[in-house]
Image (cartoon, rainbow, N blue to C red):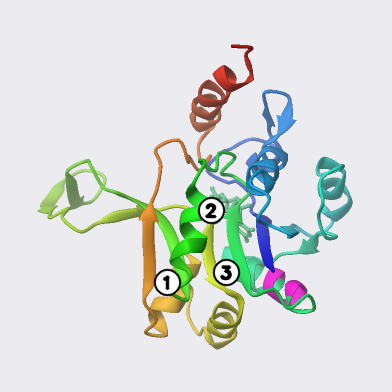
């Protein structure tokens, strides 16, 4: 069975709005609902576990009304703590596979989930990632120190897919803060597979990202 975590317990500080970005309106629907629908669209995900901030559980359940989902659980101060809480809630259902997805990424390109699941046949984890195309510089806000070779560098996206048991074990064993779930497996020495990411899979981080996502989604809603 394939489960998914919908990660929505962040505060959206860079977004800078009174409300966290996952609750913002995206063409009239909450960002997190659009992300949930995108995750469920292919029919592979049987269990959707939302993870949200303390006190927001009923509201998140309301935003997901009509979609199949488990009761939202409370996340933690960091994304890693939030994922760990979500995995603990899913453990009772003993899924074989879990997708971990940012509620702030409302577009899951067609084919991404299929590619991830195919890669899991031979790896404990698989993530969508895109090669870096800009020239990379190391420096501070005022000055460039050096140019960093970009060959072999990728930008990681979500959903990230894992066999449930190794991801849960990696979270339970973690003693440091990783920036994504794949890194926890890397620390265990596990090989994480890469599948092609997509430019449309934007993580809403700053207010202008919401407009970019709306511009991508709007043509899909218009009659052909
Ligand atoms: N997230 C979470 N629990 C946290 C922090 C983040 O579930 N303690 C979720 C966010 O809700 C988001 C995803 O993880 O969907 C990716 O995190 P990020 O883009 O960093 O969101 P925020 O932490 O909310 O934003 P910021 O870092 O700007 O405050
Ligand atoms: Mg954050």
Position of the N terminus by quadrant: bottom right
Mark 2 against mark 3, which lies toward the viewer?
Answer: 2
Q: Position of residue 172 (x, y in %)?
A: 60, 85
Q: Nearer the viewer, mark 1 or mark 3?
A: 1
Q: Secondary structure at mark 3?
A: helix
Residue 183 tag number:
1
Query: Observer-nearest residue: 109 or 205?
Result: 109
Q: Residues within 10 Å of mark 2 (few under 14, many from 20)?
A: many
Disc 3 residue lies near ligand 1 with CB under 8 A: yes
**Residue linked to disc 2:** 113
Q: Secondary structure at mark 1?
A: helix
- Which of the labelled discs sits on residue 80, or is there none? 3
Residue 134 visible here: yes
Residue 29 forms part of the magenta stretch: no
Write down the region rendered in magenta.
86-90
| Image quarter where ligand 1 lies | bottom right
Name the residue at 56% across, 44% down.
105
Q: Residue 54 at x, y = what percent?
A: 80, 60
Marks 1 and 3, the one that precedes in the sequence:
3
Position of residue 18 in the picture relative to residue 166 (left or right) = right
């Amino acid at each position: 069975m394939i489960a998914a975590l919908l990660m929505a317990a962040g505060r959206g500080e860079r977004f800078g709005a009174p409300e966290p970005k996952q609750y913002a309106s995206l063409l009239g629907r909450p960002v997190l609902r659009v992300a949930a629908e995108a995750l469920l669209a292919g029919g592979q995900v049987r269990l959707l576990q939302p993870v949200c901030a303390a006190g927001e559980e009923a509201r998140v359940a309301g935003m997901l009304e009509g979609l199949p989902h488990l009761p939202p659980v409370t996340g933690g101060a960091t994304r890693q703590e939030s994922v760990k809480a979500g995995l603990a809630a899913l453990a009772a259902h003993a899924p074989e596979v879990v997708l971990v997805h940012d509620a702030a990424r409302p577009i899951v390109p067609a084919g991404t989930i299929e590619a991830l699941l195919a890669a899991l046949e031979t790896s404990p984890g698989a993530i969508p990632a895109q090669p870096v195309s800009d020239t990379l510089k190391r420096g501070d806000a005022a000055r460039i120190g050096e140019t960093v070779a970009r060959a072999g560098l990728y930008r990681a996206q979500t959903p990230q897919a894992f066999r449930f048991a190794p991801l849960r074990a990696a979270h339970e064993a973690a003693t440091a803060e990783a920036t994504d779930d794949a890194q926890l497996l890397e620390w265990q020495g596990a090989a994480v597979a890469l599948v092609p990411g997509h430019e449309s899979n934007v993580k809403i981080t700053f207010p202008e990202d919401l407009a970019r996502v709306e511009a991508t989604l709007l043509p899909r809603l218009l009659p052909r």
